Amino acid sequence: MSAESDLQRIYDEHAQALFAFLLNVTRDEDDTRDLLQDVFVRLARQPDLLQSARNERCFLIRLAHNAVIDAIRRRNARDKYHERFGAEEPPLFASAAAADEQSFRMALSSALGELPPEQRAVVHLKLWEGLTFEQIAEALEIPMNTAASRYRYGIDKLRERLRPLYDEIK
């Protein structure tokens, strides 16, 4: 039996059960599909992986569970990085000669740092890159309405945070 036909048999016999297991753990169909694909890609790359397994299904479930744990760890690490990166306030704007303008630029940079990363990304792409909501949705792989909502919420938060400073400068 070839490795390809063996992989096909394994998929036919176990994919549905693995999908149900992963869906129950992740509660997200897209993540479940990605993780199931990861398991079978790993099996395709390492065809001898199952040879030492006493129970094929249990071994595959363990592979799937490990894939979930790895995905959660990667997601947590990425989220921590985004939080830390977003909390840092790198100079986003060039220095201004006028004190009021410099103060406003610093406040805007700080206010942007307070936005959730998802809103910050959409606001940046809309305001600084000039992308449409359709382009933003495609770039971030989110629905267009989600992009528009994140932009609206982000702009509302910026307005609320910067209004006192704007009123003071006027």
Image: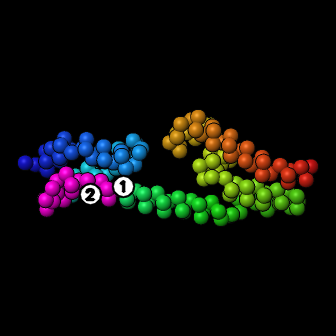
Of all residues shown, which one is farthest toward the front? 24
Task: Return the residue nearer the eye: 40 or 64.
Answer: 64
- The reply to whether dot 1 and dot 2 touch (C-beta < 8 Å) is no
Asked whether, in this view, residue 147 is left or right of residue 10, the answer is: right
Q: Measuring from the top left, give residue 6's x and y in whole percent.
A: 13, 47
* Kind of residue at badge 2: Arg
Determine the residue positioned at 85% across, 54% down.
Answer: 165
Residue drawn at (26%, 53%) of the image: 61
Judging by the rendered image, the residue that carries numbered circle 1 is: 68
Is 131 in the magenta? no
Secondary structure at numbered mark 1: helix
Q: List x then y, in percent, for residue 122.
A: 62, 45
Q: How is the image coloured?
A: rainbow
In the image, residue 50 above or below residue 29: below
Q: Is residue 51 magenta?
A: yes
Main structural element of the magenta stretch: helix, strand or loop? Answer: helix
Indicate which disc residue 62 carries: 2
Task: Give the number of the disc on residue 141.
Answer: none
Residue 83, horizontal then vertical, whole percent: 59, 60
Give neighbour class at mark 2: few <14, some 14-19, many 20+ (Cα, 10 Å).
few
Residue at 53% over, 36% down: 143
Does 145 sit above or below residue 42? Answer: above
